[in-house]
Image (cartoon, rainbow, N blue to C red):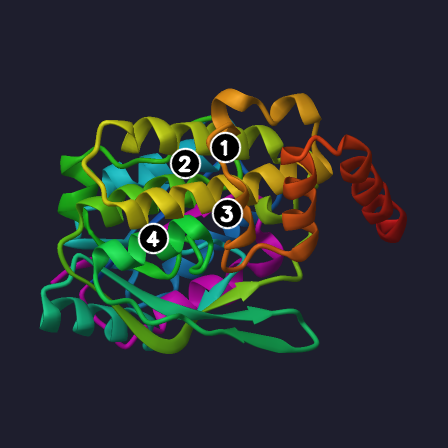
Amino acid sequence: MKVSVIVAVYNGERYLQRCVESLLAQTYRDVEYVFVDDASTDGSLPLLRDLIAHSPRRDNVLILSNDHNCGCNVTRHRGMKAATGDYMIHVDCDDYVDPRFIEKLSTVAVDGNNDVVACEMLYDYGYRTVRQAIVTVADSRDFLGKVLSGQMHASLCNKLIRSKIITEHDLYPAEGITLGEDKYVVVRALHYASRVAVVNEPLYIYNKTNENSFTSQSKARVVPSFLKLTRSIDEFFGDKNVDDDIRQAIAHHKALVLGHILLYGKHEDADTETFGDVTLRDIITHPVAPLHYKTACVASKLKLSFLVKAIAASIRAVKG
């Protein structure tokens, strides 16, 4: 079984060698590496070419290069289209992986005929690491609900996905969603998945020291992406026959986004068309939403705008 590893590269020279070497050191042999450079302005592309040229696995590597900077979603899309593996997974160029990353995931995929297999992640803060344990999932529906509600990380980078699901259902990242783009793909893949599994080992190491990464964008700047993601989820599931648990998980997703907008965005973005169906129960019962998010949402629903503004102001004061 061939696995395609897709790596979007943009100005990652500082961390790229660690990433590439961890990938080329995989114990699993039937791997296709697809690197797509998004018109980097540093030395990422020549460094990548040099690392690959000296690797005994160079024949298993495809390096693509964008003529101009297209953004992460377009770059990932190009890599996914070029992939020929039975399964595919993404790795960010500033992160790195355990040598058994592909072997562990692919073994579980094959043994259980699973469409999606996820592993735990290790957050690397430079001075310490924190294990992000993964919760148990009963089936694909349970997995989907936990990703929607935020109980499980929505990253594409810790999830091996059967390529047929991606290609048959056209599950590629959407333009205009610069943060949350993984969730856009993952919730759709889980909707179509029949069998899923998790590996309770932290095989993917997430670099939390890179201040230039997409996930380090300011909380205010990502509001438009969160809005587009939320509306796309509504649109996707609007005509689907899903049960009450998934509908509840969608409401929990909306409550989390609503809290973020109220505290860090423009209040007019918290429109009733998108968030009007979020109830007090949805807010209060959210399994992982921070207390200040819940408080802001409840205050908004009760039309206590002064309290929402006070909470937002106190957060800005603390952030300094």
Q: Which residue is disc 2 drawn over?
A: 75
Q: Position of residue 53 (x, y in %)?
A: 38, 58
User: What's the residue type where badge 2 is placed?
Assistant: Thr
Q: Residues within 10 Å of mark 4 (few under 14, many from 20)?
A: many
Tell me the SS state at disc 4.
helix
Seen at 50% across and 55% down, the residue is 285
Secondary structure, mark 1, is loop
How far is the residue under mark 2 from the one under mark 3? 40 Å
Local secondary structure at mark 2? helix
Which of the 4 image quadrants contains residue 244? top left
- Say which residue label 1 marks: 71
**Foreground mark, 4 or 3?**
3
The residue to which callout 3 is attached is 281
Q: Crowdedness of circle 3 by 10 Å Cα count: few (<14), some, many (20+)? A: few
Q: Which residue is mark 4?
A: 145
- Vertical relation: 117 (above or below) 170: below
Q: Earlier in the sequence, mark 2 or mark 3?
A: 2
